[in-house]
Amino acid sequence: MSTVQIGDLVIGGREKVMIAGPCSIEGRDQLLQIAREVKAQGAQMLRGGAYKPRTSPHSFQGLGPQGLVYLKEAADETGLVTVTEVMELEELDLIMKYTDVLQVGARNMYNYPLLKRIGKTNKPVLMKRSFMATIEEFLLASEYILKEGNTNVMLCERGIRSFDTMTRNILDLSCVPILKKMSGLPVVVDPSHGTGRSDIIIPMTLAALMAGADAVMVEVHPNPKKALSDGLQTLEFSHFRELMGQFDSLCDYIKAQQDAQDNKNLRGAAS
Amino acid sequence: MSTVQIGDLVIGGREKVMIAGPCSIEGRDQLLQIAREVKAQGAQMLRGGAYKPRTSPHSFQGLGPQGLVYLKEAADETGLVTVTEVMELEELDLIMKYTDVLQVGARNMYNYPLLKRIGKTNKPVLMKRSFMATIEEFLLASEYILKEGNTNVMLCERGIRSFDTMTRNILDLSCVPILKKMSGLPVVVDPSHGTGRSDIIIPMTLAALMAGADAVMVEVHPNPKKALSDGLQTLEFSHFRELMGQFDSLCDYIKAQQDAQDNKNLRGAAS
Amino acid sequence: MSTVQIGDLVIGGREKVMIAGPCSIEGRDQLLQIAREVKAQGAQMLRGGAYKPRTSPHSFQGLGPQGLVYLKEAADETGLVTVTEVMELEELDLIMKYTDVLQVGARNMYNYPLLKRIGKTNKPVLMKRSFMATIEEFLLASEYILKEGNTNVMLCERGIRSFDTMTRNILDLSCVPILKKMSGLPVVVDPSHGTGRSDIIIPMTLAALMAGADAVMVEVHPNPKKALSDGLQTLEFSHFRELMGQFDSLCDYIKAQQDAQDNKNLRGAAS
Amino acid sequence: MSTVQIGDLVIGGREKVMIAGPCSIEGRDQLLQIAREVKAQGAQMLRGGAYKPRTSPHSFQGLGPQGLVYLKEAADETGLVTVTEVMELEELDLIMKYTDVLQVGARNMYNYPLLKRIGKTNKPVLMKRSFMATIEEFLLASEYILKEGNTNVMLCERGIRSFDTMTRNILDLSCVPILKKMSGLPVVVDPSHGTGRSDIIIPMTLAALMAGADAVMVEVHPNPKKALSDGLQTLEFSHFRELMGQFDSLCDYIKAQQDAQDNKNLRGAAS
């Protein structure tokens, strides 16, 4: 199993990681407020979109370069690692200057020229599974990056499309152990996009950890109802605090289990 | 939240329940051997099909009434509660005599005449979600039973159909908290059918518990490769033992968390 | 290629067949009015549900035996062949007395005991594909009937479930040539259920004919907005008349093409 | 209803159009041979990929600029209009020089920066529906092009993903009348990708015409078994000739029907 290291932060090791932040960066104050809150609650990485792929050309498309500036400022103040989506080659250099991790969005998983170009950098990548990709296609797409030499790749399950409208997507947690086994790469789960429902994000986060996820990524906003995108799946601060309490507790349990297993293995090896 | 009681066994309460056994009852010795093993490892309910709905009319269709006799004998010897599938009205009276819980299979979730008739009994029912049913259709189908007066209903998620062939079905764990919230009924998860892969049943069982499942149902066989049906998704004994170790440990963790929460609530109420 | 014969009507031969009628039989007058209209426009078979499988137990469930009486009366008056759905074994004998063709509904395609029992009769069967059955499962399900000796089976495509909500289902016309090739049985297409939209039934009916369908089944009602079920996908009389004009014209074209092909083959054989 | 004009060729008018050619341009001889054959049989547009988006980075990725040169040569010799896929912005200027129509592939339907940039040109565009896009998403994606001022857009249905493996995709012909009604744009159907099976391309082409398609696009190769990509869905020359015979005949029928309808309308208006 490989890990991805970003400064002091390791993803894919014993410590599970929480990635949190707004869907879109809406302004300086909004982002700083959220960054401080998620940092205080124990998140290690800040997410936030400056360039937003939207189904309709008439929807809010993100703040662009100005959003990157706010993201950098939030990182400098809080010490959080940052991740933001890159949608096209032209933005790549700029985004690489302002952020720590490049996100390949679900809509771009099949954008092979973009993947190849990212593969030529050494930036850590959080690569989302397309909502229509088979696990095999997802793994082959990641090879477009790996093949060019960039092995700092994390795979992110964020829900696949189905016939049911009760959730926005079907969160396919079975892919977590399969992806880990087949690729050896760290696996992240995004229950916000994966379900589209803030009311079930806590149980699905905990389920993702037991399925083997190395990190979880959730959307947080001081006022989800007023968020410019994805309000229904976004946690408010008190809800995020509750999530982190249960997240930390379960991570402790998982580590204790692993320690016990390690000791057992050591004793077995020694005898 | 309601519970379903079968003798001393309660489903939907604090104690999580393990349901295990072969896909098909293949013979007296096979069933007794499995029953003893799963009982010894801590399972409380024995599953085993006597009437098997098979995609092809040329496949093994189950032992029929003779299978029911073996199931009863295994129950009498081990004290395990039993569940078996009922496929048609004509078999209902016989199955009710020989078993504790009636299973409605995924293919029969839309068989409304069967559901109505089962609703007129007072037998506990384990009702599987069709692999093509929306959550809403699943809940409405359960009302065909509830409306007739039988409220001893457990809902079972067993995977839905998707475009990916890496797993047999997509195990939709998001439906667990939604079903519990909308129906108040106990929810069971079947990761054997839900994934079709024995190699990921342990993580998916643990994930199901954290998603809120009240019970988990898995397939166990002394020699999965020789099983007459569903071999790829069936656990051998040593694998089931490993599963039960982790299952018990996580159940203890969940109870400790609930106790802590209860104490906190009590203190809150007292102050 | 085999054909199914019902009195003088042949399905699977050169003449394409139109099956029309209400979703549900709502009353004597409603059914007679529709039967006369569709007969006058050239339909050869009358459809109408007396027993209705409904997603909710609180919805209208059909008129039951009284509906069968009305169906028989409409058949006697108009000379139309009739088809109605059988949902359970108990109703089978009664339905066989009152109707010409037994319909297996999409929800019952996996109801193997029902299929076996129908296989023991010699009644023609119109078997619908489940909305989430693979073509292989559909063919294997039909073997449950064929294996018992009843070879008067017609296969009906009625749409499969997908992620898009613009249509009720996805009408899978590709299955038509595949089903014909693999089974040799007559194939019927139901664009009413297959699309759920009356505004595209004419083009989809014509497309079905060119895909090779032997018959098309549509829902017709004097006042679709007041229909007790499936109003959105139901044609009013003037719309059905327009459909039949285009249907007849295209059937003439297809026959002319086949005649030309036959002549060419004959000349080829003679030379 | 709008039309798209490319030189003398009009798409979306009375004349149905056949687009044919290899999946990938494999060499100069291969392409010229195919271009001559499809021209001789009546095709008006030549397809052929120079840049190929492939699931695996280890598969053949196309001849690149050299392929464009061959395509231009084939166009110059035969007079066929040409269409080829553009995968990234960097290639756009070059492709615009060498070809008549820009194809947006299914994997790039969600590549909004690419769509916007194409919208700034005045080149005709053949835009494919993603294999998991809803009709609404497809229409909104086309607005990314239209909004920038390029209204020469043709929409192409090429199959959507489903649970059945009998065909490569499900060809969603219902979307044809819906797309035409909602957008007014010409609609193309690609039964090669839509089914993945050369044995059913003839009936599905004819069905597409009756569903209202303005053009059909198929893959043709002198030796499909040796094609570098998509061999199973590719027609050999004799098979394409048979297709064109039936295509032309049905187009004549459709025009005769429209003429009759026009005359009827004129008489109605005159009386």
Image (cartoon, coloured by chain):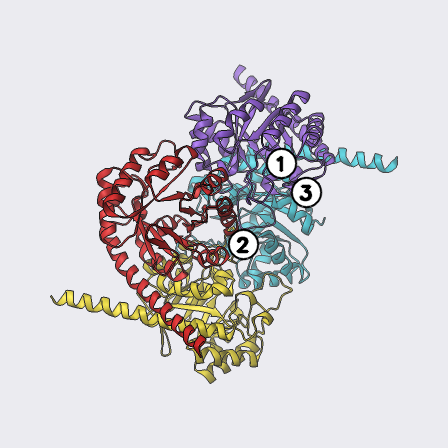
Chain colours: A red, B yellow, C cyan, D purple
Q: How far apart are marks 3 and 1 (CA)?
A: 17 Å
Q: Distance between the residues labelled 2 and 3?
A: 24 Å
Does dot 2 land on a helix, a strand or a loop? loop
Amino acid at dot 1? Cys
Residue D23, numbered circle: 1
Q: Position of residue A229 (x, y in %)?
A: 32, 40
Residues behind callouts 2 and 1 on a single chain: no
Q: Where is residue C65 in the image (x, y as percent from the top left)?
A: 51, 57
Res C102 quadrant in image: bottom right
Is residue D94 toward the left or the right of residue B121 in the image?
right
Residue under mark 2: which chain is it in?
B
Along the line of sight, the residue nearer the viewer: C193 or A267: A267
Residue under mark 3: which chain is it in?
D
Seen as rendered, the residue at the extreme left is B271
Does dot 3 land on a helix, a strand or a loop? helix
Res B242 quadrant in image: bottom left
Q: Where is residue A221 in the image (x, y as percent from the top left)?
A: 26, 45
